[in-house]
Amino acid sequence: MDWFKVTPELAVKIGLMIIYALCAYRLIGVLFAPMLRRWRSRAYLDLDPNMYELDEESESKSRFSHLDLLIRTTTNPSKYTRTSVTQFVAFSLSLFFIGYFVLLVGSRGQIPQGITISDWWSSSSFFLAAVIGGIPYSWLHIKLQLIRNANSYALIDATELLLIKHRTPGQDPNIYHVLSEMVEELEGPMKRTFYTMVSVLQVEGKTAMKEAVELFEYQIKNTWSRQLGILLIKAAMQNRNIERALQKLHEDMVEGKQIVAGEKTEYMESIIMGFFPLFLVPGIIYITNDLFDGAVVKLMFKDPSVFQSLVICVLFVIIGLATSLVLSRPKVEV
């Protein structure tokens, strides 16, 4: 990969530029995200202006970090601890360093003997090791996307169940009790989504409703979840009757589900093409290696260029598989 030459100095500059860009993005997001969310949902839900002034102050402050939210929503709640984020970062860094060493030795055919940076530097190995180190993060994002896709469908039934609970004569108006009863009747990822809300409310009380809604919205991440989250906050903090808004929201969800069903059919060819290399690539390697009496496998691990090509091929197979998994169940969104 002679075309991809990166010096240590250039790598440091690229890293600093990426950090600067991320900081700028986060700053812009903090300033404009509340404004955009207000414009998108205020008229639809007929929000109380006084309540929204309180939301503006709290929306820009998140109690949870990005990795904290990601790990909370993709792992078993009983296995999550305060050190989960630290353990995840340490694991990813370990993969990076191990991957870099293996790729460096594999590309040169021997362990570097020198002690200078240039002796141990390889731009192609660094790039591929960075990709390998990002696999755990990418895998959690794939799991999160699948959870969100499944929840986007299940949210329709959950909203209907919430509407039924509100219409039930003699039902306790306390939103915590309503959500607790719903957890017992829900199944799958949506059950865990509501369970996280109930857990936060159980530990910290009604004042933590905004934090509970933040966890809820992150596990679905569509406009409907944001709108439902606002309704839950209104019901909990202001004791508002949200039945009419719930009914309108549920009707729009059902209509959106029908539209997505047609889109899934259009994606079917891409889905099949994404799964195809998962069986095709290993099959071709096995057949050609058998025809040439094992010479193909020996060449892969002896020739640095062939070894790098194999790694890149495997990465693209994984990317295709991940894309197909996401497209196989498109997200219900307005």
Image: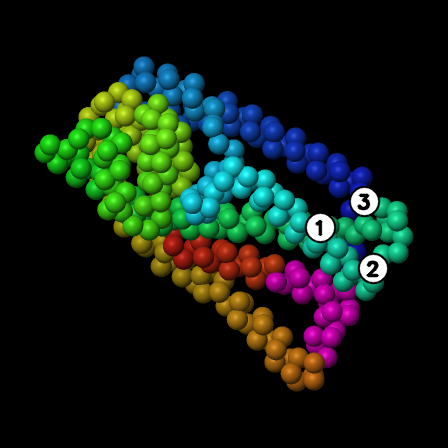
Answer with left or right where residue 63 lies relative to residue 132. left
Identify residue type, mark 1: Phe
Quadrant into which the C terminus falls? top left
Residue contact at pointers 2 and 3, CB within 8 angstroms: no
**Mark 3 or mark 1: whose residue is earlier in sequence:** 3
Instruction: Name the residue: 47% across, 38% down.
Output: 69
**Disc 3/disc 1 C-alpha distance (Å):** 18 Å
Q: Earlier in the sequence, mark 2 or mark 3?
A: 3
Q: Residues within 10 Å of mark 1 (few under 14, many from 20)?
A: some
The numbered disc on residue 85 is: none
Instruction: Specify which label sits upstream in the sequence, 1 or 2.
Output: 1
Which residues are the magenta region? 295-314
Write down the residue under mark 2. Answer: 111
Classify residue 178 as left or right of residue 311. Answer: left
Measured along the vertical axis of the image, is residue 19 above or below residue 287?
Answer: above
The 10 Å Cα crowd at callout 2, few under 14, some 14 to 19, many 20 or more, is: some
Give the percent coordinates (x, y) of residue 303: 78, 68
> In terms of image quadrants, where is residue 282?
bottom right
What residue did someone put label 3 on?
Answer: 7
Residue at the outermost left position: 169
Residue 168 on the magenta segment: no
Q: Which residue appears at 37% of the width and 27% of the height?
A: 204
* Nearest to viewer (mark 2 / mark 3): 2
**Residue reaching furthest to the top:** 50
> According to the image, label 1 marks what residue?
97
Would you identify the image quadrant in which residue 184 lies? top left
The question of residue 299 being in magenta is answered with yes
